[in-house]
Image: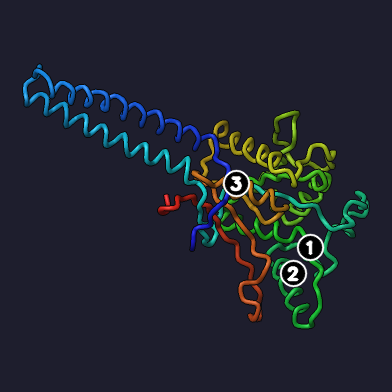
Amino acid sequence: MRPARGVIVMIDQQAQNAIRIRVYLATLLLAVPGSYLATEIHGGLGPDRLSGATRLVFVVVALGLLFVGSQLARTAAAHILRLHTRRLNKSPAEPRRVLIVFLSDGPARASEATEADWEKVVLPARPQLAWDLPQDLAAMAEYKRECKLADKRPVFWRWEQALRGVHHNRREGKLERLVLICSRESIVQAHWFTRILERYKITERVRVELLVKDGHGSRLLASGEGPLEGHFGWNFEDFDDMWRALSQLLDRLGRHEEVPDRDIAIDLTGGPKPATVVAASATIHRDLRNQYVCTNPRDPQAKTWEYEVLDYDLVLGGSGGWM
C-alpha cells in the first residue's frame, strides 16, 4: 500500500510522553559526551594531562554515548516530524472481551415511537424475527439477497450491523462486556437496543453499559429499562466531543479497571465520520483494534450471503519507511 501523505492524526498522551522522554534522553546523551569530546579535542592540542590509554577509553565511551543519543534523536525527530504517512492493516477480527460500539439512532420514525408501540416502529418489518440471533442474521442477509435478485431496494435496519458485531464477539463465549457510546438521538433509544439484546439472551452473560456525559467528564451506567434524556448523549459530529468520550472511557478501562488493550475492540461501523476517525486514531501506539462489520456481502454472487467482520489497525510511519 502506498503511503498517504498530508494526513493529520491525533497522538494519545502515552505516545506524547514517550516522545518527550526520547527527546530529553537524546539531549542529555548528545550534550554531555559532546561537551567532553570538545574538551578532549581542545586538550589534545595543548599539554597532555592524561595518559594515552585513559584518554582513548574516555573517547570510545563518549563516542558510544553519542551514537546512542543520535539514534534517540533520530527516532524522536521521526515521530515529531514524520507522522504524516500511514497504512491500515486489515485482517479477520478476533473476538474480544470488551466491545465498544457507537450506537446510531434507529429508523427515521423511531423518534415518534412510544413505550407501547416501539416494537412496531423500531424492529424491522422484514424479515419476521424469530429471536434466535444467528437465524435472524441469516434471514436478514437472505432478505437483502432476494431484493437484489428482484432488483428492489431493501429496507435496511440500522441496528443490524451492531448486532452482527456483538454476535461475532460472542463466539466461544468471549464477550463479557458491551459499552455503548450514544448520540443525543440514540441515547433515548438505547434501552430498546438493550431489550433486543435481552430477547436474544445476550445480557445473560454480557454486561451492557452506557457511557454518559457527567459535567465535563463521563461515567458508566448500566443500561436500564427506561430512556435517558438527550443531554446524556455525545455529539457524533464533533471530533473533540467524540475524542473526549473515547479517551475517558479507555483511560477508565485501562488505568482504573486494568483491562488490557488486547481485550478491547472498538466497533467503528456505526456513527458518522468524526466517530470513525476517533476510533481509528485510538489504535495508534496501542494494542487496541477497530472492528468493522462489512455492509456489503463477501461474495454477492453466492447463494448465501456472508458479512465479514474485519480487524483494522492504523499504523503510522515516516516518509522514509514504516515505523
Residue 262 in sight: no
Residue that mark 2 sits on: 140
Q: CA distance from mark 3 to mark 1?
A: 24 Å
Query: Marks 2 and 1: in contact by CB < 8 Å?
Result: yes
Q: Quadrant of residue 297?
A: bottom right
Q: Which residue is mark 3?
A: 98
Please tell me how crowded label 3 is: few (under 14), some (14-19), or many (20+) other residues with Cα within 10 Å.
many
- Residue at 43%, 43% (x, y): give it: 78
- Could you tell me how far apart the alpha carbons at marks 2 and 3 are, in whole angstroms? 26 Å
Q: Looking at the image, is mark 2 or mark 3 earlier in the sequence?
A: 3
Left or right: where 275 falls relative to 21: right
Q: Using the image as rendered, state which of residue 71 and residue 176 is in the foreground.
A: 71
Mark 1 or 2: in front is 1
Residue designated by label 1: 157
Question: How far apart are the two marked residues, 1 and 2, measured between alpha carbons?
Answer: 9 Å
Mark 3 and mark 2 in contact (Cβ < 8 Å)? no
> So how many labels did they put on this image?
3
Picture layout, residue 295 above or below residue 169: below
Crowding at dot 1, Cα within 10 Å, few <14 / some 14-19 / many 20+, comes out as some
Describe the element under mark 3 as helix, strand or loop. strand
Q: Disc 2 residue type?
A: Met
In the image, residue 188 above or below residue 300: above
- What is the three-letter code of the residue carrying label 1? Trp
On the picture, is 51 further left or further right than 137? left
Nearest the camera: 98 or 318? 318
Q: Nearer the viewer, mark 3 or mark 1?
A: 1
Asked whether, in this view, residue 1 is left or right of residue 276, the answer is left
Looking at the rendered structure, the secondary structure element under dot 1 is loop
Task: Indicate the position of residue 114 as horizontal and vertical percent values.
Answer: 92, 50
Which percent across, then down, holds residue 33? 26, 26
Q: Earlier in the sequence, mark 3 or mark 1?
A: 3
